[in-house]
Image (cartoon, rainbow, N blue to C red):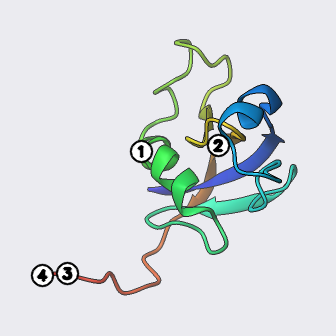
Amino acid sequence: MNKCKITVLKTTFHEDLAKEYGVKGIGKCPMHKEGQVFYADYAKPEGFCDEAWKAMYQYVFAIAHCSGVLYYGDWIDKEGVAICSCNDGLRPVIFKIEKTDEVATLDYTPVMYL
């Protein structure tokens, strides 16, 4: 398993939807800024939005474990890359996930809940 590089490509805001459904003063996502870079393997990177991670962790996991051709040719034209977004319908953030050559290491103790 290799680490994946996650880059914030765009922070978007659907003003028309926010006017109808959003709370007063809502704007673009306050968690992430365009150009931010995170590295992930088994766990959510520190400082990464919980909801964004829930929406994309399966892509990170799949790309980290496969040969890099999982999404290539289906809708992505670059090997070892996926483009996805968080699940915030008013202000989605668009991410690029790409496989790196760095091997992932388990450097934390998983928590077991009973």
Kindly identify which residue carries mark 2. Answer: 98
Estimate the spatial distance between the alpha carbons at disc 1 and disc 3, rounded to whole Å. 21 Å
Estimate the spatial distance between the alpha carbons at disc 2 and disc 3, rounded to whole Å. 31 Å
Along the polypeptide, which appears first: circle 4 or circle 1? 1
Kindly identify which residue carries mark 1. Answer: 58
Q: Position of residue 66 (x, y in %)?
A: 42, 39
Estimate the spatial distance between the alpha carbons at disc 3 and disc 4, rounded to whole Å. 4 Å
- Extreme residue in the bottom direction: 109
Per the image, label 1 sits on a secondary structure element best described as helix
The residue lying at 53 percent from left, 55 percent from top is 51
The residue lying at 70 percent from left, 50 percent from top is 23
Residue 95 vertical position relative to residue 33 in the rendered view, above or below: above
Along the polypeptide, which appears first: circle 1 or circle 3? 1
For discs 2 and 4, the disc positioned in front in the rendered view: 4
Residue 77 vertical position relative to residue 35 in the rendered view, above or below: above
Residue 84 seen in the figure: yes
For discs 1 and 3, the disc positioned in front in the rendered view: 3
The residue lying at 47 percent from left, 83 percent from top is 107
Kindly identify which residue carries mark 4. Answer: 114
Per the image, label 4 sits on a secondary structure element best described as loop
Kindly identify which residue carries mark 3. Answer: 113
The residue lying at 67 percent from left, 53 percent from top is 5
Per the image, label 2 sits on a secondary structure element best described as strand
